[in-house]
Amino acid sequence: MSQIRATFCIDRAKFHLNVDLTLPSRGVTALFGHSGSGKTTVLRAMAGLERAPGGYFALGDTVWQDDAGGIFVPTHQRSLGYVFQESSLFEHLTVEGNLLFGYKRVPASARKFKPDDISELLGISGLLNRRPAGLSGGERQRVAIARALLTAPQLLLMDEPLAALDIKRKQEILPYLERLRDELSIPIIYVSHSPDEVARLADHLVLLDAGRAVASGPLTETLARADLPHAFADDAGVVIETTIAAHEADDLTRLEFAGGVIYVAGRPEPVGHRLRCRIHARDVSLALAEPQATSILNLFRGTVTAIVPTDRTAQVLVQLRLGTTPLLARITERSRKALDIRIGHQVWAQVKAVALLI
């Protein structure tokens, strides 16, 4: 399939959804926004659980809804998997029984995965004989994801699958979600209101606000837009794709990206391994000249490409370009005036903290 097309318009008493999306058919697309922005409504419309009059939804040439053409494929006939906030496992069945429930109903010729392979991918091979009541929240969600995958879906929909988990359980399951993204070819539509989850998992980002898509594009480009600070508030920042270039003798690892070098605490991964970094705008300060005698290792020279006010009084968001890589800095308007920072100026960025998304 080439692209996913979704056009939905739904009117309720106090809510109006109107979206027209073109999404990639590979990787993870995150639907992000505050509560009530329409994320779950879009997902339910994709699944056919909520009818959008006049709507259109297609995966490449496979059309599941085209009201103009008189097409509406009911949910049970759509080749999709749906993972909810709660795992909704069959409590009377073992983990293996849950996995095989949908798998056995898929014709052998249509099956995409083997139960053993999916169990290994999601780290649940040792749980097959247990019942859901004896599983942790993270284990239950991994079983729910495995069950959805074994129905051989063309599309996997995930509605805030980590929302009911505590921080420890979220950290337990995130690496498995990354493996799904990296090792499977199924497109995933992932609903979340967590900037951390989106930054770590998504390849494409759709920002929803009051039922409308105010932004849609590759994650790294969309997060770096200076005109969307209200959407992320204190979490405004960028994600940078890097490659491990070397392990230094003083227990630092050097990462390279299209725009410079980042130093982080020593990493165990080999040279050539790719790592995703997140830099918050609040952790970036600016200077007119290259800082001297500073403890901050990560210094970058960039060009100012945008300056916009934020929701915070007396602060502005400054967008830079480090070569082809964008960076955001949040500074006070007083500092901007004192340094006379303007679009087109060359400045030095000091990065006080780099978060590795692993």
Image (cartoon, rainbow, N blue to C red):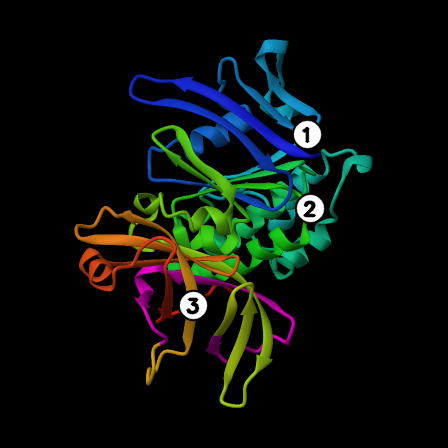
Q: Earlier in the sequence, mark 2 or mark 3?
A: 2
Q: Nearer the viewer, residue 234 or 290?
A: 290
Q: What is the three-letter code of the residue carrying label 1? A: Gly
Is residue 101 found left or right of 29 in the rendered image? right
Q: Tell me the residue that label 2 is attached to.
A: 185
Q: Which image quarter: residue 238?
A: bottom left
Q: What is the three-letter code of the residue carrying label 3? A: Arg
Q: Report the residue at 57% width, 82% height from top.
A: 247
Q: What is the three-letter code of the residue carrying label 2? A: Ser
Where does the magenta region start and end?
263-290
| Residue 11 in picture, x, y percent from top left | 38, 17
Q: Nearer the viewer, residue 78 or 17?
A: 17
Is residue 3 found left or right of 265 in the rendered image? right
Q: Which mark is residue 60?
A: 1
Q: What secondary structure is marked by label 1?
A: loop
Report the quarter where the N terminus lies.
top right
Vertical side of 281 occupied by 140: above or below = above
Q: Earlier in the sequence, mark 1 or mark 2?
A: 1
Q: What secondary structure is marked by label 2?
A: loop
Q: Tell me the residue that label 3 is attached to.
A: 301
Vertical side of 293 occupied by 213: above or below = above
Is residue 103 found left or right of 193 in the rendered image? right
Q: Are marks 1 and 3 in contact (CB under 8 Å)?
A: no
As for residue 64 lying within the magenta part, the answer is no
| Residue 13 in picture, x, y percent from top left | 30, 17
